[in-house]
Image (tube, rainbow, N blue to C red):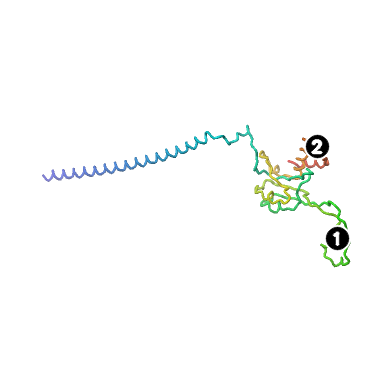
Amino acid sequence: MKNVVQKTGRTIGTECGLHRLTCQSFEYGVTDMIKNLREALKGMWSLLLGLNITRRNFFRPQITVHYPRKTNSLEGYRGHIELVCKDDDPYTSKCIACIACSRLCPTGCISLRIKREASESRPERAAPPDMAHMPIKLKKKYFHPEKVVRGPKTFHLNYNFCSLCGLCVENCPAGALRFTSDVYLAGYTRQEFEYDLLARMRHQAQEKEDMSGNESGYIPGNQQINNDRKSLH
């Protein structure tokens, strides 16, 4: 009888343990199923939101330019800098050689040399009797016969080091610098990106005159134009 009870008790205990394991496994399975279903619903909701955005933009007019079949204006594009010519003389720059651009350039890619030219004669003033005791600066005011105008003798740009910060264009007091819109700029060597901006400005002026049939009537020295063209890359 004891053996039967013991066997029966063991059997009952074993069956209860199996029942507990089965219940726990069922609970874990239900929990995992709910979690997976929740993640699937979140993914479906995210997919629907993306499709809704796609649907709204699908019927809007296109703003993309299909280059090269179409081209758009290049307003705001910053290419390398170039000199701005005077309105009455396309072969002379507005630059006054103040060297502000060269000093402000963080990479030091701008270098220029200054030239001084006499523009007009000044009337001589009568010297005061105590001229011998006057400072040198005051003596120059009385005896300097001409008015000197500063300008660039050479103006070079090494575009290899330019950071396109725009400080030179923004701080030029004479408005003698501007950005170009050349988006097709490419080359095989670094020397091709070193520019003589004075020669470039004169070459552009010559090309405009050739296209317009020399309507302005301004005829520069042919030798100077040929030298400028040779210095261009």
Whether residue 205 is visible to the viewer of this picture, yes or no, is yes
Disc 1 residue crowd, few under 14, some 14–19, many 20+, Cα 10 Å: some
Q: Position of residue 166 (x, y in %)?
A: 66, 48
Instruction: Tell me the residue at 23%/44% (across/down).
Output: 17
Instruction: Tell me the residue at 78%/39% (across/down).
Output: 206
Q: In this image, 195 relative to 119: left or right?
A: left
Disc 2 residue crowd, few under 14, some 14–19, many 20+, Cα 10 Å: few
Above or below — where is 155 with respect to 213? below
Which residue is more in the foreground, 179 or 51?
A: 51
Given the image, on which type of amino acid does mark 2 rest?
Glu
Helix, strand or loop at disc 2? Answer: loop
Q: In this image, 32 relative to 92: left or right?
A: left
Which residue is more in the foreground, 205 or 22?
A: 205
Whether residue 222 is visible to the viewer of this picture, yes or no, is no
Name the disc covering residue 212, or none. Answer: none
Name the disc covering residue 142, or none. Answer: 1
- The answer to whether the residue labelled 2 contacts the one labelled 1, judged by CB atoms less than 8 Å apart, is no
Q: In this image, 134 relative to 25: left or right?
A: right
Q: Position of residue 73 (x, y in %)?
A: 65, 38
Given the image, on which type of amino acid does mark 1 rest?
Tyr
Give the labeled residue for mark 2: 215
Of labels 2 and 1, earlier in sequence is: 1
Q: Position of residue 102 (x, y in %)?
A: 71, 52
Instruction: Tell me the residue at 41%/40% (across/down).
Output: 42
